[in-house]
Image (cartoon, grey):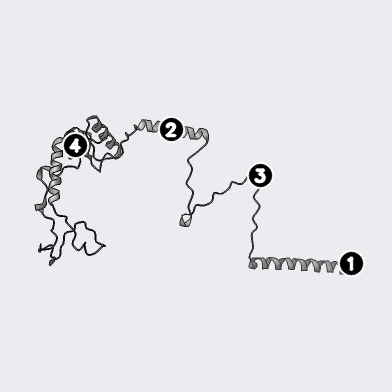
């Protein structure tokens, strides 16, 4: 359920709406001519620009005379006055009837949770609550971490590793584990032709020497 707007602020918001209806729609110059240009306001800066010179027939420019009523100026659409909050102590100073807290962007996650918890107690509206979950105590986190590790050791499961990626983001196929019984075959090394030539020459020389020795023995026996 949406919270009710303060009674005074409701009147001020209506006053601001009435004043807004009287204001013209401020258009960016030449936005009606080119579709590529948005209508969001940009101040014309040209020396001879007719809009900047406020020549009759051209759209009006933004100026201080078009301000809203001073009483309603700076009100949030919800009807509350915004108060920037950095810690729990600043939350205590907020008036829940008229003001609403806005947490500063520099506030961390843990301090944000403490601020939101304090705002709920005092029924203060937070304009940018973000995550409303309360932060866990560090001891509880450690206990949970230890339990998860113990469960992993008991079941023998570990965190699944991410697959390694090749070029163009393709996942490498997982290598199948080889059974222990199968022995790896010795890899045959290919020798180059130049390295094989001297070995062949040595073998031919040995064969020739043995043949000559046999022939010499046969000749001695015949004599």
As helix, strand or loop, the secondary structure at mark 3 comes to loop
Q: Nearer the viewer, residue 211 or 114?
A: 114
Q: Is residue 215 left or right of residue 74?
A: right
Q: Nearer the viewer, residue 107 or 184?
A: 107
Q: Earlier in the sequence, mark 3 or mark 2?
A: 2
- Which residue lies at the image location 24% right of the left edge and 59% below the top edge? 38
Q: CA distance from mark 2 to mark 4?
A: 48 Å
Residue 181 image label: 3
State the residue position of label 2.
146
Percent of width and height locating residue 178: 61, 46
- Which residue lies at the image location 10% right of the left edge and 45% below the top edge? 69
> Which quarter of the figure is the N terminus placed in?
top left
Give the number of marks: 4
As helix, strand or loop, the secondary structure at mark 2 comes to helix
Q: Earlier in the sequence, mark 3 or mark 4?
A: 4
Q: Earlier in the sequence, mark 2 or mark 4?
A: 4
Q: Earlier in the sequence, mark 4 or mark 1?
A: 4
State the residue position of label 1.
221
Q: Residues within 10 Å of mark 4 (few under 14, many from 20)?
A: some
Q: Residues within 10 Å of mark 2 (few under 14, many from 20)?
A: few
Q: Nearer the viewer, residue 147 or 16?
A: 16
Percent of width and height locating residue 64: 10, 53
Tell me whether the residue at label 3 lies in contact with that at label 2, contact meaning CB atoms closer than 8 angstroms.
no
- Which residue lies at the image location 47% right of the left edge and 57% below the top edge? 167
Front disc: 2 or 1: 2
Q: CA distance from mark 3 to mark 2?
A: 39 Å
Percent of width and height locating residue 80: 18, 39
Tell me whether the residue at label 1 lies in contact with that at label 3, contact meaning CB atoms closer than 8 angstroms.
no
State the residue position of label 4.
5
Q: CA distance from mark 3 to mark 4?
A: 79 Å
Q: Earlier in the sequence, mark 2 or mark 1?
A: 2
């Amino acid at each position: 359920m949406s919270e009710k707007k303060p009674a005074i602020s409701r009147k001020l918001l209506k006053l601001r709406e009435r004043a807004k209806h009287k204001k013209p729609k401020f258009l960016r110059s030449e936005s009606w001519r080119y579709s590529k240009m948005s209508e969001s306001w940009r101040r014309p800066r040209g020396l001879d620009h007719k809009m900047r010179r406020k020549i009759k027939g051209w759209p009006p420019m933004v100026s201080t005379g078009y301000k809203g009523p001073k009483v309603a100026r700076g009100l949030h659409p919800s009807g509350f006055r915004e108060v920037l909050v950095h810690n729990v102590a600043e939350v205590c100073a907020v008036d829940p009837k008229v003001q609403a807290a806005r947490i500063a962007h520099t506030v961390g996650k843990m301090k944000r949770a403490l601020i939101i918890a304090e705002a709920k107690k005092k029924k203060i509206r937070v304009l940018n609550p973000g995550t409303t979950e309360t932060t866990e105590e560090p001891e509880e986190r450690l206990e949970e971490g230890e339990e998860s590790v113990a469960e992993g050791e008991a079941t023998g499961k570990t965190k699944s590793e991410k697959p390694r990626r090749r070029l163009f983001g393709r996942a490498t196929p997982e290598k199948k584990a080889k059974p222990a019984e199968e022995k790896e075959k010795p890899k045959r090394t290919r020798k180059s032709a130049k390295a094989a030539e001297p070995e062949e020459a040595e073998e031919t020389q040995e064969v020739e020497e043995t043949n000559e020795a046999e022939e010499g023995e046969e000749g001695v026996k015949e004599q």
